[in-house]
Amino acid sequence: MNPSNKPVRLPRTVVVIGLVSLLNDFASEMVVPLIPLLLATMLAAGPVALGLIEGVADTVSNLLKLWAGRHSDLYNRRRKPYVVFGYLLSNIARPLIGISGSWLTVLTVRVTDRIGKGIRTAPRDALVSDAIHDGIAGRAYGFTRALDHAGAVLGALAAAAIVYWGTQRLDVVIALSAIPGLLAVSLVVFGIKETARPDDVNAERAPLSWSRLSPITRRYLAVLAFFTLGKIPETFLLLRGHELGMPVVELLLLWAAMHVVKAIVSGQAGQQTDRVGRRPLILTGWMVYAITLFALAFVTQPLMLWSWSLALGFYFGLTEGAERALVRDLAVPAERGTAFGWFHMLVGTAAIPAGLLLGGLWSVYGVKTAFLVSSGLAFLATAGFWRWVQINPQKNSPRN
């Protein structure tokens, strides 16, 4: 409670983690948008390699999020070591992409980077939860997400500036990402002071059983996994831009602009979904996504790619928070950990066939077919969500 009605300052831990997120995404987004360009220009690899790299990397990351979060809850009284190791591993591995001699090396380094993300993400979010009290959770997580998106914008802009005014050597730009990355690691090590939690927090571990989830939760997660099969790795937009003859600087600016849209929309959508519910935002966002993929199939000019890429940014901002909030809404307290575990595993596992499907169709039948098939899957998933995920706001019962 705050009897004086004065704004409550965010705890030091929350502020530090927000700044760490900014610096780490600064480093990450100096590298990630350059990966498809590196593959296409220096390593002679195409969309299949890119799809495999992004799919495997995201899957490994999402599987580890469940393990690390549960492990920091059950077997260790501190979360900071997971956070430090995760950021350190990513920021040591990521700059090595610039000196990779083949796409297989890029795959190895990218997976190592995402292993770091998988290890740190859940313990980091739990560390924020440990540091705050009821009543400021939304503000705290909103603050860290805002700085995360701000770092992504700054990273892409920094890479664009280096290419435009400094050097067009992609390996040099990628190597420079180590500077903000190591600053992020140092800030975690010296800026966060974690208080050990009592032994009684180590509650009995609930079994990871699909049958323990309510029927409505299982239907939602199954439809979400199917929707993921139609999702494209965002880096494919940059590959398409490269095919259309867009220069590296313009592609980096496009990447930054997408994150600006995400940052603006996600903040407003997070408040709106608490007022009108999760279902309207998810249905709207998924429909926007399906329509956007359909339109991308017919993009032939950079300006068209700009327009529809920003529309994808709108989709992400509209749905990311609502999708996760719905997992929490549908799961009773005893199954929330299991529900979120399945959420990450299903979405992560679906990322591999999604990336391979788009990359394979792109290589064999062309970009138009690839985007049209992905759009069709997204439309089907949207219809499935509308039909099978009926949400009773009064009661989240296993019979719903």
Image (spheres, helix red, strand yellow):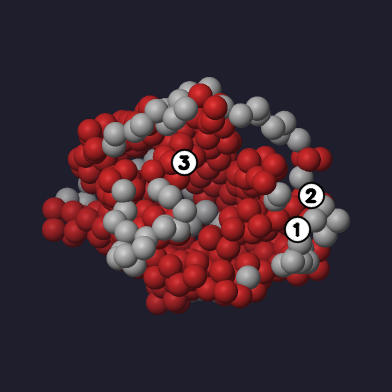
Classify mark 2: residues with Cα within 10 Å, few (<14), some (14-19) or many (20+): some
- Residue holding disc 2: 214
Mark sitting earlier along the chain (1/3): 3
Question: Label 1, label 3: how many angstroms apart (C-alpha)?
Answer: 25 Å
Tell me: 10 left or right of 288: left
- Between 316 and 400, which is closer to the camera in this rendering? 400
Look at the image and tell me in which quarter the N terminus lies.
Answer: bottom left
Question: Label 3, label 2: how many angstroms apart (C-alpha)?
Answer: 25 Å
- Between 39 and 226, which is closer to the camera in this rendering? 226
Q: Are marks 2 and 1 in contact (CB under 8 Å)?
A: yes
Mark sitting earlier along the chain (3/2): 3
Q: Are marks 3 and 2 in contact (CB under 8 Å)?
A: no
Classify mark 3: residues with Cα within 10 Å, few (<14), some (14-19) or many (20+): some
- Residue holding disc 1: 396
Secondary structure under badge 3? helix
- Residue holding disc 3: 126
- In the rendered image of this protein, does residue 376 appear above or below residue 358? below
